[in-house]
Every structure is written in structure tokens, then in C-alpha cells.
Amino acid sequence: MPVKSVSRKVQGALDRKRLPRHVAVIMDGNGRWAAARHLPRVMGHRAGIRSVRAVVEAAREWGIQVLTLYAFSRENWKRSAAEVSTLMRLLDEYLRRELDNMMRNGIRLGVIGEIQGLPEKVQAHLEEVMKATAGNRRLRLNLALNYGGRAEILRAVRLAIAEAQAGRLKPEELDEAAFSRLLDTGDLPDPDLLIRTSGESRVSNFLLWQISYAELYWAPVLWPDFGKEAFHQALEEFQKRERRFGGR
Ligand code: IPE
Ligand code: IPE
Ligand code: MG
């Protein structure tokens, strides 16, 4: 029976039993944050890393199981070579600096997207950190890198065709659950909550299959201004939503 609570919760209290298992975030607005301060865009990306740290820390502390951060899309290669190489360098730095913290805090790193398309040094660091953190269980942190939702779906379709051609999969066996397992997120639950910062309300090719029943939350702040408090607000809002999944 759906219970609509009329009592006002103490501000700031989250219902631990009704937390999203998987939160996905489109971290947007670094460039505008920098532009507003007459700074180069890279300073916005640097500032954005502080938000990444804050959100990862909060997710771990609050008991969220999976956090997927959209860090670089397949379409982001369209940006200037200087911006792309800075983003790759910042990613590399982040991986180097965060490994200790991930080990201390039980964080397991995962990647979705086409990792082979990234610079070799970044690939090597990603592999290293994924391997080192593989046994960690508290929070699964997924970075979406060189990621595009349509491309991911196509790769899964190709896998399914190859399996079928090899005689290991009958077309009628390919149901939604089986198809989901072929995606990069194959071992993860679908996101319950999708947050996008910067006030834009579009999904920009992120997790197209997986967000079919996610609650969408458009945060008005730019990513470098999104911290623990803003994340908390998003979770409070999530807990007010009534999810129906087509039922009533
Ligand atoms: C998000 O901020 C970071 C990445 C896409 C890597 P943007 O760089 O898109 O910032 P805006 O949207 O131009 O403000
Ligand atoms: C989405 O942001 C991609 C990431 C956050 C990595 P963009 O800034 O690339 O998206 P658009 O161009 O506004 O749709
Ligand atoms: Mg943007």
C-alpha cells in the first residue's frame, strides 16, 4: 500500500531504506562555471574534480551501492585538442591520486564506454586501478569514458548476433534481461536516479537503455558548484517521488 507521509522529516534526514541503489550523474557545466569567472575552461574541469570527490565520498558514506559518472562522451572528441588532452590528463591525475583513497574506503572502480579509444597511458592506469580495487565492495564507482549510449547498444547487438551465429544463443532467448547483460553495465542494476547538473534537461546519449524507469533530476547548479548538499537535495527529492513502473 503506498503510504504518503504527511509528517515533515527533519531537514536533512534521508530514509536509508529508500535510497537509490544506483545513481547516474551527467556532470555538466564546467565550462560555463569557468567562463563566469573569466577563467579558461580547464579551470572549470579542475574545479569539477572537487565535486567528483565530494559526491563519491557522500555516496559511500550514505550507502549508495553504485555511482556512475559521465566523464567523457564519444561526442566530446569534437572539442579542441587542447581541451581533450587536458581532460585526459586530469583523469589520469585523478586515478593516480585516488587509488589510496579507494582502497581505504572500499571503492571499486569500473569503466563503461570504449576504453580502447582512450590514450594508452590512461588505459593502463584504468586497468591498474580496476585490478587493484576489484575486491572492494562498499561502493562501485563507474566512470563513463568515451561513452555513448547508442554505440553501447549497437555493440551489445553485435555481440548477440555473434553469439547467435556461433550457435550459443537462440533469438527467442534474447529477452530484456539477457540483452542487459551484454551492455557495459551488464553486472549492475539499472540507475534509479539520473542527475544532470547545469540546468540542461537532456540526456546527451547517456545510458539510453538503462534509464527507462530512472527518476530524472535536473539540478540548476553547474557541476563545480554541486557538492554534498546539492546531492543530498537530489536524494531528498528522489525519496518524495512515487515510482510506478507502469502500475498504479
Ligand atoms: C562537463 O562540463 C564536463 C565534460 C563534458 C567533460 P562542460 O565542459 O560540458 O561544461 P559546459 O557545458 O560547456 O559549461
Ligand atoms: C554530456 O555533457 C557529457 C558529459 C557530461 C561527459 P555535454 O556538455 O557533452 O553535453 P551537451 O553537448 O550539452 O549535450
Ligand atoms: Mg556541457
Image: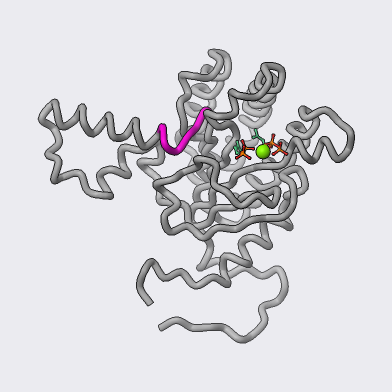
Residue 221 colored in magenta in the image: no
Q: Position of residue 226 (x, y in %)?
A: 73, 49
Is residue 197 rendered to the left or right of residue 145?
Answer: right
> In which image quadrant can residue 236 be found?
bottom right
Residue projecting furthest to the top: 120
Q: Quadrant of ligand 1?
A: top right
Q: Position of residue 58 (x, y in %)?
A: 65, 51
User: Which of 190/41 is in front?
Assistant: 41
Magenta residues, start to end: 146-151
Q: Position of residue 79 (x, y in %)?
A: 65, 24
Say which residue appears at 70% left-offset and 46% top-offset: 54
**The N terminus: image quadrant:** bottom left
**The C terminus: image quadrant:** bottom left
User: Which of 67/35 is in front?
Assistant: 35
Is residue 166 rendered to the left or right of residue 123?
Answer: left
Q: Position of residue 228 (x, y in %)?
A: 71, 53
Residue projecting furthest to the right: 38
Is residue 159 rendered to the left or right of residue 183?
Answer: left
Say which residue appears at 40% left-offset and 34% top-offset: 152
